[in-house]
Protein backbone atom coordinates (compact mmCIF):
# COMPACT_ATOMS: atom_id res chain seq x y z
CA UNK A 1 0.00 0.00 0.00
CA UNK A 2 1.15 3.54 -0.82
CA UNK A 3 -0.09 6.22 1.58
CA UNK A 4 -0.33 9.68 -0.01
CA UNK A 5 -1.65 12.90 1.54
CA UNK A 6 -4.92 14.31 0.23
CA UNK A 7 -3.94 18.00 0.34
CA UNK A 8 -6.77 20.33 -0.77
CA UNK A 9 -6.15 23.29 -3.05
CA UNK A 10 -5.41 26.45 -1.02
CA UNK A 11 -3.98 24.57 1.98
CA UNK A 12 -1.73 27.01 3.85
CA UNK A 13 1.58 26.44 5.58
CA UNK A 14 3.88 28.73 7.56
CA UNK A 15 7.56 27.79 7.70
CA UNK A 16 8.91 27.21 11.19
CA UNK A 17 11.91 29.23 12.39
CA UNK A 18 14.19 26.26 11.66
CA UNK A 19 12.77 25.84 8.16
CA UNK A 20 13.26 29.57 7.53
CA UNK A 21 16.94 29.32 8.50
CA UNK A 22 17.41 26.35 6.15
CA UNK A 23 15.57 28.13 3.32
CA UNK A 24 17.63 31.33 3.75
CA UNK A 25 20.97 29.51 3.79
CA UNK A 26 20.14 27.25 0.86
CA UNK A 27 18.76 30.09 -1.27
CA UNK A 28 21.95 32.13 -0.77
CA UNK A 29 24.25 29.14 -1.35
CA UNK A 30 22.42 28.03 -4.52
CA UNK A 31 22.47 31.55 -5.93
CA UNK A 32 26.18 31.99 -5.22
CA UNK A 33 27.09 28.60 -6.69
CA UNK A 34 25.01 29.12 -9.83
CA UNK A 35 26.48 32.55 -10.60
CA UNK A 36 30.02 31.32 -9.87
CA UNK A 37 29.51 28.57 -12.45
CA UNK A 38 28.02 30.76 -15.17
CA UNK A 39 24.35 29.76 -14.81
CA UNK A 40 22.29 32.82 -15.73
CA UNK A 41 19.52 33.88 -13.34
CA UNK A 42 16.28 33.42 -15.27
CA UNK A 43 13.74 34.80 -12.82
CA UNK A 44 10.50 36.00 -14.35
CA UNK A 45 9.58 39.20 -12.55
CA UNK A 46 10.95 42.48 -11.26
CA UNK A 47 11.56 41.32 -7.68
CA UNK A 48 15.11 41.05 -6.36
CA UNK A 49 17.13 37.89 -6.93
CA UNK A 50 17.39 37.41 -3.16
CA UNK A 51 13.61 37.61 -2.74
CA UNK A 52 13.04 35.27 -5.68
CA UNK A 53 15.44 32.66 -4.30
CA UNK A 54 14.12 32.96 -0.72
CA UNK A 55 10.50 32.59 -1.84
CA UNK A 56 11.38 29.71 -4.17
CA UNK A 57 13.29 27.75 -1.54
CA UNK A 58 10.62 28.50 1.07
CA UNK A 59 7.90 27.28 -1.31
CA UNK A 60 9.83 24.04 -1.92
CA UNK A 61 10.15 23.38 1.81
CA UNK A 62 6.46 24.21 2.45
CA UNK A 63 5.41 21.90 -0.40
CA UNK A 64 7.54 19.07 0.97
CA UNK A 65 6.05 19.51 4.44
CA UNK A 66 2.50 19.34 3.07
CA UNK A 67 3.15 16.30 0.87
CA UNK A 68 5.56 14.35 3.07
CA UNK A 69 8.45 14.47 0.61
CA UNK A 70 12.03 15.55 1.17
CA UNK A 71 13.37 18.78 -0.31
CA UNK A 72 16.57 18.78 -2.31
CA UNK A 73 18.97 20.31 0.20
CA UNK A 74 21.94 20.30 -2.16
CA UNK A 75 23.56 23.38 -3.66
CA UNK A 76 24.66 21.61 -6.83
CA UNK A 77 24.05 23.31 -10.16
CA UNK A 78 20.45 23.28 -11.32
CA UNK A 79 20.03 24.33 -14.92
CA UNK A 80 17.30 23.24 -17.32
CA UNK A 81 19.52 24.37 -20.20
CA UNK A 82 22.40 22.18 -19.03
CA UNK A 83 20.12 19.28 -18.08
CA UNK A 84 20.93 19.41 -14.36
CA UNK A 85 17.52 20.54 -13.06
CA UNK A 86 15.89 17.21 -12.26
CA UNK A 87 13.17 18.40 -9.90
CA UNK A 88 12.88 19.92 -6.45
CA UNK A 89 11.50 16.83 -4.76
CA UNK A 90 10.27 13.35 -5.67
CA UNK A 91 7.37 11.09 -4.79
CA UNK A 92 9.54 8.08 -3.89
CA UNK A 93 6.57 5.70 -3.67
CA UNK A 94 5.58 6.60 -7.24
CA UNK A 95 8.81 5.51 -8.87
CA UNK A 96 10.67 8.70 -7.93
CA UNK A 97 8.15 10.88 -9.79
CA UNK A 98 9.84 14.32 -9.95
CA UNK A 99 8.06 17.52 -8.90
CA UNK A 100 9.22 20.96 -10.03
CA UNK A 101 7.86 23.39 -7.44
CA UNK A 102 7.08 26.88 -8.75
CA UNK A 103 6.25 29.99 -6.73
CA UNK A 104 4.26 33.15 -7.34
CA UNK A 105 3.56 36.08 -5.03
CA UNK A 106 0.13 36.55 -6.57
CA UNK A 107 -2.96 34.78 -5.18
CA UNK A 108 -4.32 34.50 -8.73
CA UNK A 109 -0.86 33.92 -10.24
CA UNK A 110 -0.22 31.47 -13.03
CA UNK A 111 2.17 28.57 -13.20
CA UNK A 112 5.14 29.85 -15.24
CA UNK A 113 8.12 27.95 -16.61
CA UNK A 114 11.13 29.00 -18.64
CA UNK A 115 11.31 28.06 -22.30
CA UNK A 116 14.34 25.90 -21.46
CA UNK A 117 12.09 23.41 -19.64
CA UNK A 118 11.69 20.04 -21.31
CA UNK A 119 8.50 18.02 -21.38
CA UNK A 120 8.44 14.64 -19.69
CA UNK A 121 6.90 12.48 -17.00
CA UNK A 122 7.05 14.90 -14.11
CA UNK A 123 4.75 17.27 -12.28
CA UNK A 124 4.76 20.99 -11.75
CA UNK A 125 3.33 22.22 -8.45
CA UNK A 126 2.44 25.85 -7.79
CA UNK A 127 2.74 27.49 -4.40
CA UNK A 128 1.85 31.11 -3.78
CA UNK A 129 2.38 33.50 -0.93
CA UNK A 130 5.05 35.65 0.60
CA UNK A 131 7.83 34.17 2.69
CA UNK A 132 7.33 32.53 5.21
CA UNK A 133 3.61 31.98 4.43
CA UNK A 134 2.68 29.72 1.51
CA UNK A 135 -0.43 28.23 -0.05
CA UNK A 136 -0.69 25.15 -2.28
CA UNK A 137 -2.40 26.04 -5.58
CA UNK A 138 -2.25 22.71 -7.45
CA UNK A 139 -0.47 20.42 -9.90
CA UNK A 140 -0.14 20.03 -13.65
CA UNK A 141 1.76 17.47 -15.70
CA UNK A 142 4.78 18.86 -17.58
CA UNK A 143 3.19 17.48 -20.75
CA UNK A 144 0.31 19.94 -20.16
CA UNK A 145 2.55 22.93 -19.47
CA UNK A 146 5.49 22.61 -21.87
CA UNK A 147 3.49 23.19 -25.06
CA UNK A 148 3.96 25.73 -27.83
CA UNK A 149 0.37 26.91 -27.31
CA UNK A 150 1.30 27.95 -23.75
CA UNK A 151 4.16 30.26 -24.77
CA UNK A 152 3.36 33.77 -23.64
CA UNK A 153 4.73 36.94 -22.10
CA UNK A 154 3.29 38.44 -18.93
CA UNK A 155 5.61 41.43 -19.14
CA UNK A 156 8.91 39.90 -18.03
CA UNK A 157 9.96 37.79 -20.99
CA UNK A 158 8.64 34.83 -22.91
CA UNK A 159 7.97 31.56 -21.14
CA UNK A 160 5.37 28.86 -20.68
CA UNK A 161 2.20 30.26 -19.10
CA UNK A 162 -0.12 27.42 -18.05
CA UNK A 163 -3.70 28.37 -18.83
CA UNK A 164 -5.36 25.17 -17.62
CA UNK A 165 -6.79 24.29 -14.24
CA UNK A 166 -4.38 23.22 -11.51
CA UNK A 167 -5.56 20.10 -9.69
CA UNK A 168 -5.06 18.08 -6.52
CA UNK A 169 -2.59 15.21 -6.43
CA UNK A 170 -5.45 12.70 -6.58
CA UNK A 171 -6.95 14.31 -9.67
CA UNK A 172 -3.68 14.73 -11.52
CA UNK A 173 -2.56 11.14 -10.87
CA UNK A 174 -5.89 9.79 -12.13
CA UNK A 175 -5.68 11.72 -15.41
CA UNK A 176 -5.40 8.89 -17.96
CA UNK A 177 -4.23 11.24 -20.68
CA UNK A 178 -0.94 11.95 -18.85
CA UNK A 179 -0.46 9.42 -16.05
CA UNK A 180 1.20 6.55 -17.93
CA UNK A 181 4.34 6.69 -15.77
CA UNK A 182 2.36 6.17 -12.53
CA UNK A 183 -0.59 4.02 -13.65
CA UNK A 184 0.85 0.83 -12.16
CA UNK A 185 0.94 2.45 -8.69
CA UNK A 186 -2.69 3.64 -8.66
CA UNK A 187 -4.33 0.45 -7.31
CA UNK A 188 -1.99 0.52 -4.29
CA UNK A 189 -2.60 4.16 -3.31
CA UNK A 190 -4.52 4.99 -0.15
CA UNK A 191 -5.28 8.67 0.54
CA UNK A 192 -5.09 10.16 4.02
Image: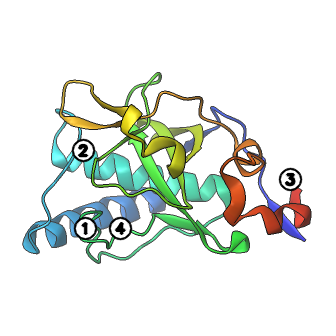
- Residue drawn at (70%, 41%) of the image: 168
Observer-side mark, 4 or 3, equals 4
Residue 80 in the image: above or below residue 123: below
- Distance between the alpha carbons at the discs numbered 2 and 3: 34 Å
Label whose residue precedes the other's in the sequence (4 or 2): 2
Q: In which quadrant of the rendered view does residue 171 lie?
A: top right
Residue wearing tag 1 = 30
Q: In which quadrant of the rendered view does residue 52 lie?
A: top left
Label whose residue precedes the other's in the sequence (4 or 3): 4
Residue 76 in the image: above or below residue 102: below
Q: Position of residue 21 (x, y in %)?
A: 37, 62
Q: Position of residue 187 (x, y in %)?
A: 91, 63
Residue wearing tag 3 = 192
Residue 104 in the image: above or below residue 183: above
Q: Mark 2–mark 3 contact, CB under 8 Å?
A: no
- Residue drawn at (12%, 59%) of the image: 40
> Would residue 16 be visible to someone looking at this image?
no
Secondary element under disc 2, as helix, strand or loop, is: helix
- Few, some or many residues within 10 Å of mark 4 (<14, 14–19, 20+): some
Q: Position of residue 166 (x, y in %)?
A: 59, 34
Q: Position of residue 86 (x, y in %)?
A: 42, 69
Label whose residue precedes the other's in the sequence (3 or 1): 1
Residue wearing tag 4 = 85
- Residue drawn at (23%, 39%) of the image: 44
- Distance between the alpha carbons at the discs numbered 4 and 2: 20 Å
Secondary element under disc 4, as helix, strand or loop, is: loop
- Few, some or many residues within 10 Å of mark 1 (<14, 14–19, 20+): some
Quadrant where the N terminus sits is: bottom right
- Few, some or many residues within 10 Å of mark 3 (<14, 14–19, 20+): few
Residue wearing tag 2 = 51
Q: Please give the label number shown on residue 118.
A: none
Secondary element under disc 3, as helix, strand or loop, is: loop
Amino acid sequence: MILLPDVPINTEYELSEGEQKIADRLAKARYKNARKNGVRDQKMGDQSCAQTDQNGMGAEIAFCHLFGTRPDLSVTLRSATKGTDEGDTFFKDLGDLPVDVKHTDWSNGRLLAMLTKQTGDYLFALMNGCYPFFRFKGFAWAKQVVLEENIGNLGHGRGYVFKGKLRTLQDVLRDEKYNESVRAYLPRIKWN
